[in-house]
Image: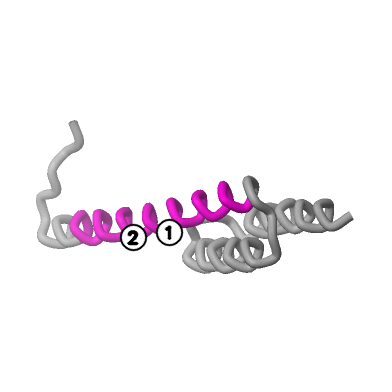
Amino acid sequence: MAAMPITKGAIRKLRADKRKKEANLRVRVVLSETIRNMRKKSTAVNLKKVFKAIDKAAKRGIVHKNKAARIKSRLARLVVAKRS
């Protein structure tokens, strides 16, 4: 069991951390769902949606910018491979 915060600042930080955790979780879920849909059906429209979700997650620091670039590269290759 985690220790309960004592100071007022620590109590406020705990509240803020809970809000941030929920917001980050929502972005992470959207990201994983769009990636999953892209892997099932790789189209240019889905690629655009995935890029938007990845960029948003990278901007907010949920995923590292290099990981975001790596994911985008791999998913873009799916669309190129499907065209050939």
Dots 1, 2 in contact, CB < 8 A: yes
Q: Where is mark 2, residue-wise?
A: 23
Type of amino acid at the residue the image marks with label 2: Ala
Type of amino acid at the residue the image marks with label 1: Val
Residue 8 rendering spot, x and y as whole percentages: 10, 60
Viewer-side residue, 6 vs 60: 60
Q: Residue at x 11, y 56 (%)?
A: 7
Viewer-side residue, 21 vs 38: 38
Q: Where is mark 1, residue-wise?
A: 27
Query: Total of numbered circles in the picture?
Result: 2
For residue 41, which numbered disc appears in the image?
Answer: none
- Which segment did they paint magenta? 13-38
Horizontal side of 7 relative to 83 (left or right) equals left
Q: Quadrant of the N terminus?
A: top left
Horizontal side of 27 relative to 7 (left or right) equals right
**CA–CA distance in space, label 1 to label 2:** 7 Å
Looking at this rendering, what residue extends furthest in the right direction?
84
Q: Residue at x 63, y 57 (%)?
A: 68
Residue 34 rendering spot, x and y as whole percentages: 54, 55
Can residue 36 be found in the magenta stretch? yes
